[in-house]
Amino acid sequence: MLIVFSGLPGTGKTTLARQLAARRSAAYLRIDSIEHALRTVSPDGDVGPAGYVVALAVAGGNLSLGIAVVADCVNPVAESRAAWRELARSSATPHLDIEVVCSDKAEHRRRVEQRSSDIPGFAVPDWAAVETHDYQPWTSDRLIVDTAVLSVEDALSLIEGRLESLVGSAD
């Protein structure tokens, strides 16, 4: 099973992805952590798509062992979204795309402005960076989870319900 959480910073992706990975004993891959590690060894700090390339490779290794994977990423462009779908297809594993949004702009801004990094040395983006982030509209199917109207538990229940129907339909 490949579960990909996508969305702008501050929407609640990491909170949901971590809890779901723990509940399912799944491998947890966070692009922020991977990119931050890559920046520490990159002379100019520009890692480009390398974080996603690394995450896809690690995810593929886990999927080949039958280990479920939860990916936590902004996933802002069609190419990265397609790469996750292709990995699931080539691994013959069920796949769920989840776009996490916060439809209340004031609440989203509050979250961004009040959060601190849980990755040592990693600077979280400010509100201006979130507002101007290149985030392409989705054109493919996904589960949209709005954390402005759903509690963490309700969001996880919604996701678990979709996963159960996905796994049930694969049988």
Image: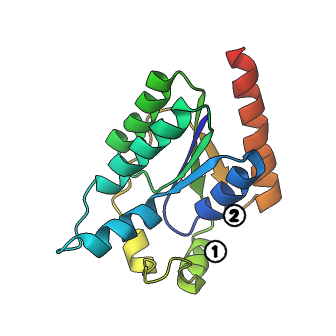
Q: Residue at x 58, y 72 (%)?
A: 108
Q: Position of residue 23 (x, y in %)?
A: 77, 50
Q: CA distance from mark 1 to mark 2?
A: 7 Å
Quadrant housing the C terminus: top right
In the current view of this chain or complex, which residue is farthest to the front?
65
Quadrant housing the N terminus: top right
Q: Which mark is residue 107?
A: 1
Q: Which mark is residue 148?
A: 2
Residue 103 visible in the current orientation = no
Does residue 63 lie above or below 126 as drawn?
A: above
Q: Residue at x 66, y 59 (%)?
A: 18
Q: Residue at x 76, y 58 (%)?
A: 150
Which of 71/154 is in front? Answer: 71
Q: Residue at x 48, y 42 (%)?
A: 59
Name the image colouring: rainbow
Does residue 23 lie above or below 38 as drawn?
A: above
Amino acid identity at mark 1:
Glu
Q: Position of residue 93 (x, y in %)?
A: 57, 26
